[in-house]
Image (cartoon, coloured by chain):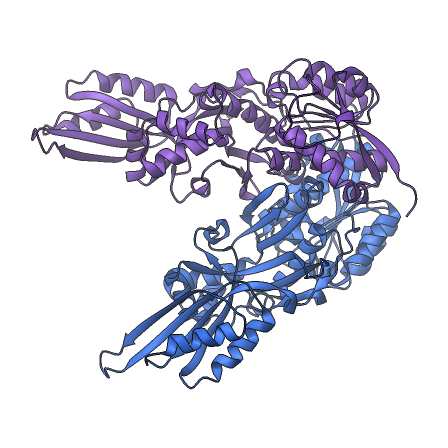
Chain colours: A blue, B purple
Amino acid sequence: MTELRTLKVALLGCGNVGAQVARILIEDADALAARTGARLQLSGIAVRNVNAKRDVDLPQDLFTTDADTLVKDADLVIELMGGIEPARTLILSALRNGACVVTGNKALLAQDGPTLYEEADKAGVQLSYEAAVAGAIPILRPIRDSLAGDRITRVLGIVNGTTNFILDQMDSTGAQFADALAEAQRLGYAEADPTADVEGHDAAAKAAILASLSFHTRFALENVHCEGITSVSAADIAAAKDAGFVIKLLAIAEKLTDADGGEGVSVRVHPTLLPREHPLAAVRGAFNAVFIEAENAGELMFYGQGAGGTPTASAVLGDLVSAARRIVLGGPGRTETTTGHVPALPIDAVMTSYYIGLDVADQPGVLARIAQLFAEQGVSIEIMRQTIHRDAESNVESAELRIVTHRASEAALAATVEAVKGLDVINSVTSVLRVEGV
Amino acid sequence: MTELRTLKVALLGCGNVGAQVARILIEDADALAARTGARLQLSGIAVRNVNAKRDVDLPQDLFTTDADTLVKDADLVIELMGGIEPARTLILSALRNGACVVTGNKALLAQDGPTLYEEADKAGVQLSYEAAVAGAIPILRPIRDSLAGDRITRVLGIVNGTTNFILDQMDSTGAQFADALAEAQRLGYAEADPTADVEGHDAAAKAAILASLSFHTRFALENVHCEGITSVSAADIAAAKDAGFVIKLLAIAEKLTDADGGEGVSVRVHPTLLPREHPLAAVRGAFNAVFIEAENAGELMFYGQGAGGTPTASAVLGDLVSAARRIVLGGPGRTETTTGHVPALPIDAVMTSYYIGLDVADQPGVLARIAQLFAEQGVSIEIMRQTIHRDAESNVESAELRIVTHRASEAALAATVEAVKGLDVINSVTSVLRVEGV
């Protein structure tokens, strides 16, 4: 074999994922050289504290606090620090120096992606970020390359393992949200401050990235309608289960056509009912999956581990090898195309089915009055089921009404729910949830 | 927008898939131009009979019987004729002329892939074949690029829709193989001569391709151990179901280490029991899925439509857009790496669990004698279950014994089965099937 050239790799950040990336770069150096045609030499790891304890035992002389100097001297830069700054400045500096950049920084991409993409285009180098969405699952490259000749119409993703674990716990054990969250924290699936996960912010950043690649148009975080899972109750889960559904937090990006034939894309994150036989319903625990509908390919699903140091490192290394191969073979890099020019749609433009739970008076004629009210609002009912509960001690009866609607607009549904609340036979509206996959 | 360059696309073959590719090239011309930076002009379609009836209405002047001339003038060649010749000669001619080639010809790739890959390498052009395995599912590109920094340890694929449909029918309706095959033929899922599908030959060609990319080593059809599904009975399916399993025809490529630490790869196709909770068990009807285990990524699954004109056309177009982008951006193409150098292992080297069904005499002590015999052969039993049937009319009792073993070698298992047959208490060995996913 002829002498291989050496490519210098700078690693920024050495947390959960970064430590595994460093380990693999060192342990698998020969295999990586064979696959790229160049030796990938880890030239240094920039951290805040060079003496901090790491998950993996790594040579101490690799660590430095001087990220700037490390980046200036690198052919390939891996950014795994997270957060906006200094990650943003370091990535821009690397791209301007002609280095290819691999990052898993979904927050930065969702907030300021276009600035980074433009800098990479200008420099003719690769900026890749497979690790930013759904951890180990190859999903961005298939969307960008494999489906490049198709038209994606809808993406439904379980892209946050923490919330999927919590909802799955609630579904399988009947636990309340707070207890399932505590269990997730105990097992290390949720952080001490779980806000970014349970409020849907993490999923929203990933939704913006998935939507941008799927529809060849740049969508930012402010285009994403976001609702978390904190208000999903054990009763919601039980009622959904009883009706043959499971509740998942979905990241959804969907092409919609209005009455005039104009196209737009709705990007949103919210708790969603899915039929139990839908492929995404079987995604349990902290696993992730992305379900894609395309005009020609039909239905596709990509399933795997969405987080964790080692799985996410696999995605980082895949991007790194691809970038190194491009450098070895020559020629400029390839970025996503953004020639779609479709507008982001507000949540009001979305038509979905809804599940509505009502606590109603146990009187004759209640069903008919509610059905009449739905009809007046133009919301068509697909399924309506009444259950009568009798309290064994007090002998008091209460009635529960569960309704699944046909597709309706957010506005029509909201108006209907408001009107329903005004009926004297309604004790309370117990839940309003969107349904997909029917 | 500046004037775009034009790339000439030659299409060879206009069957089920080819007709859809032609339709999309014409209908989506603007979108494809936006995504590639070049106009993809369908310069002609080579067919045997220019007047044959097609699935799609296409301009008559595109058709020609002169494939040679068409190929000579093309920047991109799509080969969808199938079979070995003239496909092989035309692809080699296209590569030598510097054209990128997209093909779905699994038989040719499995038989003579290395010749094609070497010609593509020499010419510095892309040869891509996503459509050859699992139709619309992006699986080859994720293995080649996204997992390029990982080590794949095992691939389990449902890669033949016809046999999955037949086995699924047998599982859900209790039908015998012959009846399920007839139903598949009636619905167009199986051909009049179903040999290539039901004997596993189609899956074997795909297994060779999957193994080659997964283990960076070229495996040919003769390296694949192949068993079809013709001998799978309704009783096998029922017994598997009763024990919590489903029977699938799997294409398996697996890295094995022998006692001396030497590495090899077993590539094989055979009916296999899978636990019902395994992600592949939920793949119903004619759908395909590929389940991958990698050292870092962990478990991944890719699911979608494995056949059909329009879905497979999506994979062809994805390859075409990628090749066109490479031409526009400049620089040589990228092919798979084959630096793995691991040997193909014979089926004898494989250790799997086995399911064995026995029709035994209803006598005391039969279980103990059979358990003793397994122990003598060094095959460890995981589960042993006896069921007594009493015929309502004749009042005659018969006993059925179902055994699931721990991992054992093919040789040890064969010796055990031979020895079992020699016992006077055995009426017959009703099934011997391999188990995966436990």
Residue A296 % position (x, y): 63, 41
Q: Position of residue B79 (x, y in %)?
A: 70, 24
Which residue is drawn at the image coordinates 70% and 35% (left, top)? B23
- Report x, y in % for residue A7: 79, 39
In the picture provided, is B150 more to the left or to the right than B369? right
**Residue B87: x percent and y percent?**
68, 17
**Which residue sits furthest bottom?**
A424
Determine the residue positioned at 39% across, 72% down. A401
The one nearer the camera, B155 or A359, is A359
The correct choice, above or below, for A217 with respect to A83 in the image is above
Residue located farthest toward the left when viewing the structure as drawn: B395
Residue B147: image quadrant is top right
Residue A99 lies, with reference to residue B164, above or below; the image says below
Left-right relation of B275 to A404: left
Total residue callouts: 0
The quarter in which the N terminus of chain A is drawn is top right
Residue A48 in view of the camera: no
Q: Seen in the image, is B314 located left or right of residue B436?
A: right
- Closest to the observer, A54 or B362: B362
**B320 or B66, which lies in front?**
B66
The reply to whether residue A332 is visible in this rendering is yes
Looking at the image, is B149 positioned above or below residue A210? Answer: above
Work out whether B256 lies above or below A414: above
Name the foreground residue: A345 vs A94: A345
